[in-house]
Amino acid sequence: MGAKNLCALAITLLSCLLMLSCTDGKRRQMARIIIEADSMNRNYVPMTSDSLLTLACRFYDRHGTPNERMKAHYLLGCAYRDMGEAPHALDCYHQAVACADTTTKDCDYHTLVTVYGQMAWLFQTQFLPDDEIAALKMVAQMARMDCDTLTEIIATHRLTSPYFMKCDTDSVLIVEKQVRELYLQHGYKDYAGQAVLGSISIALDRHHLQEADRLLSIYRNESGLFDDEGEAVRGGSYYIDKGIYMTKVGNLDSALYFYRKAIECEQYEGAYKGLLSVYEKQNRPDSIAKYARLLADANDSSYLHVNQEAVHRISALYNYSRQQKIAEGQADKARKANMMKTILLGIIVVIVFVFFFAYIRTRQRAKEKVLNLLNAYNKSQTELTAAIDRQRLLRYDYEVALQGKDEEHHQLLCQIQEDINQKEGEIDVLKKKVKCLEEQLRQLSSSDLENEFKKSNIFKLFNERRKSKYVLEPPSEENWHELIELFRTHYVRFNTFITSNRRLSTNQYRYCVLLRMGFDNTDIGILMGKDKDQRYHLRKLICETLFGKSVNVKVLEDLLKEHF
């Protein structure tokens, strides 16, 4: 199997393993959990367990889109809210917000509005006005991104509650004026009429009675919260404010009437307080005692004086829980990153090993192919030489037989002629085979084989012995034998040229081998133990054998290089 096929197989196996980690069946199961939880939340059905939603969060954290992750963490927070675990609920809301990707066009801003709205409600119940303000501003911002104008204005309107808690009445007036204009601008007249309650209370506290009367009239006529007979259909805060106004203008009978209307609307604390103030002005001891006791029983306003230290403890609990989850999330991400690095490193090691194994195997096969071709070539060369010798003998016999005149010589002549024809046919086949093998050997000869040859120990030995200090220590016959054997397999083309149909002596052959290996005339003299005259004589014989007597000895190197 080739290196490319092995690499493709390894990558395919890895892809299959990764794909098996997430199945469609599991995704459908998690989707059902989310749909059921969302339905319960929308229909105000309390959720009593977090186990299934926790599984859904884990699944979508690995395989879900940003919107799916946000939805899962939001519903888990709603479950904790229904179970009375406010810190856990708030932490889940923070995680849901962190999952949202507001840079994409398909971001679920509607769910983001809901998440921030739930956070604002939790902060309100825990008397944390600054956090509630920040959450409500995010509600308005996300509603704007969702192109939900009414929700944006309502979220801004809700800022009056935490501003009241902070006693920041100027901000309340600014917000109510702003949202009233926005309501009217977009055609929500009834909402605009309701956006004056805070201003009414502030005007009464500041004794701006004319402004209070104007605002009360707006609320009464434009809020849409009164029926045709003038009775409030929802809430009773209007009657409390109207009673306070009547008390301040001195119309105590009307004030008593409106306070009693407030009691009918279950506004007990404000109503009892107002009745007590009227009876104090009328100096009616029995009524004062009665409503003072009722006010004490109904007064559940201690939340306005919540111990600030307890508030800070709750806030710290929120922050600690959130930071703890953030740290755990970062540690989990680091573990996953390290795991992925380990897996990738393992894959790289496997791929490198596969390529290395394939490379070694390919080189071994190439070497085996060269040796097989060389053996076949040598065998064919030997057969060709034997056939040529046999042909010569047959021609000699033919010439001898040709001189005879008798019948016996004539028969022998015919027989010899047949043998000659047969051998000529065999010689033609062998010549074609030798030519084919020579061509294959030429194609296999390359710079890679030459580089490999020059890295061998025998070449390094000869390269060292060419130095003048070894002039008396030429290579041994074993060294020469080892060099020639390696040379035949790595310089196939050149070796074929100097040996095919040519009769070089041992010294002449060795001279050609050393010249092909890159040694100059002086180096060759040291390695072969030959002086200048002996080397000249060798070069002359090589020229005559390989190129003919007419060739100049001085151009021997150039002629041989043409066959390198």
Image (tube, rainbow, N blue to C red):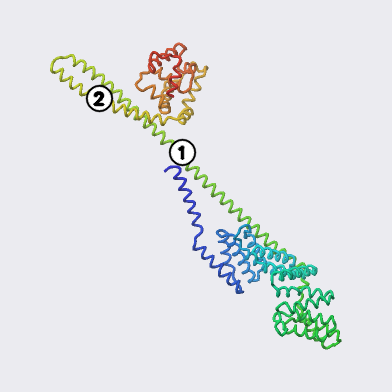
Q: Callout 2, which amino acid?
A: Lys
Against 127, is 448 above or below?
above
Q: Residue 64 sits in which quadrant?
A: bottom right
Label 2 near label 1: C-beta < 8 Å?
A: no
Against 198, is 535 above or below?
above
Query: In the image, 313: left or right of 78?
Result: right
Disc 1 versus disc 2: nearer the observer: 2
Q: Callout 1, which amino acid?
A: Tyr
Nearest to N terminus: mark 1 or mark 2: 1
- Few, some or many C-alpha atoms within 10 Å of disc 2 (few <14, some 14-19, many ≥20)? some
Q: Residue 45 sits in which quadrant?
A: bottom right
Residue located beneath label 1 in the image: 359
Rendering coords of residue 479 (x, y %): 44, 23
Rendering coords of residue 391 (x, y %): 26, 21
Q: Residue 124: in sight, yes or no?
A: no
Residue located beneath label 2 in the image: 423
Give 282 or 172, whichever is nearer the viewer.
Answer: 172
Distance in Å between CA atoms under marks 1 and 2: 45 Å
Rendering coords of residue 438 (x, y %): 37, 28
What label does residue 422 carry, if any? none
